[in-house]
Amino acid sequence: MNISKKVLRFAGRDIILCGEQPFYRSSGRNSGKPGEWLPFDGIGVMLGLWFVKDRYLVEKYDPLYRYGTAELKKISEELGEMIIPEGKISSPFEVNEFLNTKDSKYFNSSWGDWFKKSWKDGDFDKYKK
């Protein structure tokens, strides 16, 4: 498994790349899976901030819910057995640039330009944990 040495942190969640697939360490608040590494595709920056993970949300009672595929669930389990340090606190733009996914590029370009202009000093403070 090819895991990035670089670890970022946004909104209290650590973020890594496993190959080209991003994962974040879940807080458990919405997923009910605290501490588990879950796949996602970037930080959405339209009308707020969120972790883009909709393609991994299969049926709620499916064992692959929040993982999407058996392969990603296996990677999540392997990551959970590793000691991965807390990441460097980063902005959503830094996270998206690091992830380099289709979604993260989209949010850093079209919406990102608008969002960066409207963002004020201190706006990220509530996401720094």
Image: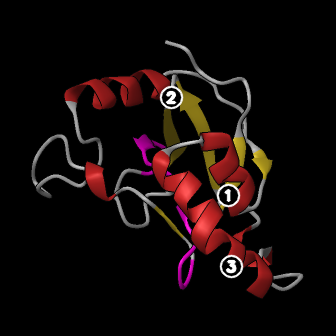
Q: Nearer the viewer, mark 2 or mark 1?
A: 2
Where on the picture, by quarter, is residue 107?
Answer: bottom right
- Mark 1 secondary-structure assignment: strand
Query: Does 75 sit above or below residue 129?
Result: above
The residue positioned 54% from the left and 85% from the top of the image is 47
Q: Earlier in the sequence, mark 2 or mark 1?
A: 1
Q: Is residue 43 left or right of residue 113?
A: left
**What colour scheme has been applied to the protein in the rendered image?**
secondary structure
The residue positioned 41% from the left and 42% from the top of the image is 39
Rendered location of residue 115, percent (x, y): 68, 79
Rendered location of residue 96, percent (x, y): 63, 52
3D distance between C-alphas at marks 3 and 2: 25 Å
Query: Does 80 sit above or below residue 45?
Result: above
Nearest the viewer among 74 and 32 is 74
Instruction: From the image, give the main secondary structure of the stretch colored magenta.
Output: loop
- Marks 3,2: beta carbons within 8 A: no
User: Amino acid under label 3?
Assistant: Phe
User: In this figure, which residue is indicated by the disc labeled 1?
Assistant: 10
The residue positioned 70% from the left and 70% from the top of the image is 127
- Mark 3 secondary-structure assignment: helix
> What number of labels is visible?
3
User: In this figure, which residue is indicated by the disc labeled 2?
Assistant: 20
Q: Which residues are magenta?
A: 34-48
Q: Quadrant of the C terminus?
A: bottom right
3D distance between C-alphas at marks 2 and 1: 19 Å
User: In this figure, which residue is indicated by the disc labeled 3?
Assistant: 115
3D distance between C-alphas at marks 1 and 3: 17 Å
Q: Earlier in the sequence, mark 1 or mark 3?
A: 1
Q: Is residue 54 left or right of residue 22?
A: left
- Marks 2,1: beta carbons within 8 A: no
